[in-house]
Image (cartoon, rainbow, N blue to C red):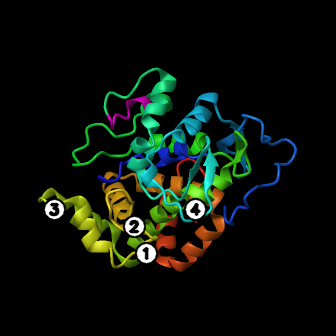
Amino acid sequence: MGPLRPVFPLAALAMLTLACRTVPATLPEPDTGAATRTSNTVFVESQPKPEGGRLFEPLSADAIQVFRCWFTDPYEYMFTYDGEPFEFNDRAFGTFMAGISGILYYGNLNNCVGDIIGEPPRSYSDLQPIERFAGVSATLPNSSLPFETVNPEIIHWARAKLLPAPNQYIDGIPVQLAYDRVFHRFFRVMAVSLFELHQQYAIAAEAQTYLRDTSNGDQGIDWLERRYTHSMPAFNGSWDGTTMTTPMAAGFWLRRQLDGSIGPCWHGLRDVLERYDPRWLAEQLNHYPNAQVALAQLPDTIGGSAP
């Protein structure tokens, strides 16, 4: 699998998702006022309340269709099948082992969005349908960096529009169940790679070394695997062409350090973990005190508390 694509928060589109605890095989019905198992209404974060809480609004019918579509025919080798399966669309899925490219392309996210807006992608990696769906560009214009950058505006859009409440259902499926059985590894790998870069290394210096060496001919994934394989947790995955490793995820953060979007991307990831994996997040921040201090300094321009 090639280098991680730069639009991390669009991972939210691929999920029914996103729990500090192990979710049972079936969850209790939501309280009165929440969507029922037979309802197509799913609530997502809209904006912070002035007093610090959160407002919710229904997810659009088009966005719900994107969630359904992603699970129609994703590449089967992106999943392991050694745990309790997640069943949806008459198929069973295990833990998602791939990365952002797996979500966007091997899961056909760009094709799903293209069908909705009536504009199929022009190529395998064409992000234009997703950009039109979001109403903002995924990348920054006129960048001189030798990789695709991240536009913070698409991070803000995903945080505001694509995070269902964890006790909501889509087509009878609780979103927490999808997080715990399918997507938890992806988000934990993304988080731990960032924490390790702040705990063990000086991330700004690491990013400059990465840029220098890859600009001089080093292959990005080779460089990342050599540098970080023995110093970062493996999360039961190794470099095999499909699996996202912790060093690969570290490369995503080095590129975000270089293009200036590390703050918005961290706060997008933090939103996911605070909502669906808060106990694990709290444990990790306590385990990585240097990272906790450094990340608390990154401004959050659309609200929410720092760790």
The earlier-in-sequence mark between 3 and 2 is: 3
Q: Secondary structure under badge 4? A: loop
Cα separation between marks 1 and 2: 7 Å
Residue 125 inside the magenta-drawn segment: yes
Label annotation for residue 306: 4
Residue where numbered disc 3 is placed: 218
Residue 187 inside the magenta-drawn segment: no
Mark 4 or mark 1, which is nearer to you? 1
Of the 4 image quadrants, the one containing the C terminus is bottom right
Q: Looking at numbered disc 2 in the image, what kind of residue is underneath it?
A: Thr
Label annotation for residue 246: 2
Q: Residue at x 66, y 49 (%)?
A: 175
Count of all numbered marks drawn on residues in the image = 4
Mark 2 or mark 4, which is nearer to you? 2
Cα separation between marks 3 and 2: 19 Å
The earlier-in-sequence mark between 4 and 3 is: 3
Q: Looking at numbered disc 4 in the image, what kind of residue is underneath it?
A: Ala
Label annotation for residue 233: 1
Mark 1–mark 2 contact, CB under 8 Å?
A: yes
